[in-house]
């Protein structure tokens, strides 16, 4: 799903398809959700610096605040403390520099692929001929040629995600925030989309923050894999991934690296269990 604020025509006429990634600085971000009976500490102060054009994967079991952190970076959720800086500017709300994509590609069912991709451009007042040109460029980039006039219900899950990625890229954000975008896809489609996303990232130079609970997917895609633990949500490790690209999921070095990360994650979970156990009995 794509959420965006309004964009200006200028943004397109000056640097269309060319805006490269910007840095992100997450500084002491915490989040407490106040409930009726109790508060949930979704994030205990998190610090994270992401370089311009870096591909960073966030992994961890459910409930460790990954989605919350992405929403805060997107400016859709406010933090309880701390600040997010995007390209040196403090984030105070949503902006077209940052776009958030979810597992369920929430495209408009009443529009075909082409019109879905053109939607944000139309809102920005981009003239029709230019809209078509930009949409065509991204349709090609995500390999959806021939499906321009298909409606969303006529597409497979993988094609929907491709369309959602094209729609996100069409508005030329500099940061892509992706929340388990391939989590609902079959393995074959997921492998294919991972490879395509890597190519797009290489060609566009966007900064990508990619959430997954699939450790191998994280190692296949990330320059870094940042590991979260739950209750309270926090960062426990930050693994640089220096394997050459493109990476194969079957590669031994990749499998070994994934095993190390999984072990760190399992240790953290076990410590957590002991804490819970100790408190309860
Ligand atoms: P993740 O994406 O890692 O699974 P989330 O960021 O979705 O984790 O959630 C972190 C914690 O915050 C969980 O315990 C979740 O139940 C809680 N939480 C998330 N959103 C809300 C909300 N809107 N209101 C109350 N609690 C929430
Ligand atoms: Mg989540």
Image (spheres, grey):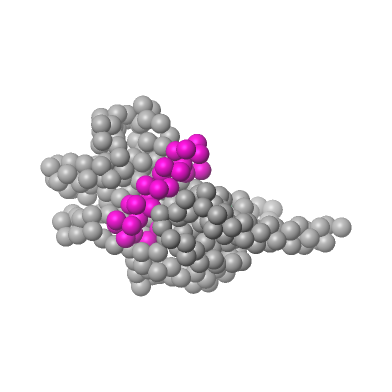
Q: Nearer the viewer, residue 236 or 35?
A: 236
Q: Nearer the viewer, residue 34 or 150?
A: 150
Q: Quadrant of the N terminus?
A: top left
Residue at the spot x=28%, y=31% of the render?
147
Residue 7 in picture, x, y percent from top left? 25, 54
Residue 134 in picture, x, y percent from top left? 20, 46
Res 120 visible: no
Residue 6 belongs to magenta span: no
Drawn side of residue 254 relative to residue 50, left or right: right
Is 16 located above or below residue 186 in the figure? below
Residue 187 in picture, x, y percent from top left? 50, 39
Residue at the spot x=20%, y=55% of the render?
16
> Magenta residues?
182-208
Residue at the spot x=53%, y=56% of the render?
254
Residue furthest to the front in view is 252
Residue 203 belongs to magenta span: yes
Instruction: Please name the predominant secondary structure of the magenta segment in the image.
Output: helix
Res 111 visible: yes
Is 107 located above or below residue 234 in the figure? above
């Amino acid at each position: 799903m794509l959420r965006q604020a309004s964009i200006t025509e200028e943004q397109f006429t000056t640097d269309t398809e060319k805006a490269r990634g910007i840095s992100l600085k997450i500084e002491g971000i915490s989040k407490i959700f106040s409930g009726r009976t109790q508060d949930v500490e979704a994030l205990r102060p998190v610090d994270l610096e992401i370089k311009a054009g870096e591909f960073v994967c966030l992994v961890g079991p459910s409930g460790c605040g990954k989605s919350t952190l992405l929403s805060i970076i997107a400016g859709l959720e406010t933090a309880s403390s701390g600040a997010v800086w995007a390209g040196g500017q403090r984030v105070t709300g949503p902006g077209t520099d940052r776009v958030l994509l979810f597992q369920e590609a929430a495209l408009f069912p009443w529009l075909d692929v082409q019109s879905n991709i053109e939607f944000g451009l139309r809102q920005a007042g981009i003239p029709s001929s230019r809209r078509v040109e930009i949409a065509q460029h991204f349709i090609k980039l995500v390999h959806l040629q021939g499906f321009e006039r298909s409606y969303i219900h006529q597409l497979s899950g993988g094609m929907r995600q491709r369309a959602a990625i094209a729609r996100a890229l069409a508005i030329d954000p500099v940061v892509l925030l992706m929340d388990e975008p391939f989590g609902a896809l079959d393995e074959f489609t997921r492998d294919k989309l991972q490879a395509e996303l890597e190519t797009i990232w290489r060609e566009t130079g966007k900064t990508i923050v990619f959430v997954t609970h699939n450790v191998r997917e994280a190692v296949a895609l990330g320059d870094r894999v940042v590991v979260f633990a739950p209750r309270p949500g926090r960062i426990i490790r930050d693994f640089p991934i220096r394997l050459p690209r493109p990476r194969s999921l079957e590669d031994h070095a990749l499998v070994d690296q994934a095993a190390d990360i999984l072990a760190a994650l399992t240790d953290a979970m076990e410590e957590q269990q002991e804490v819970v156990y100790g408190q309860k009995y």
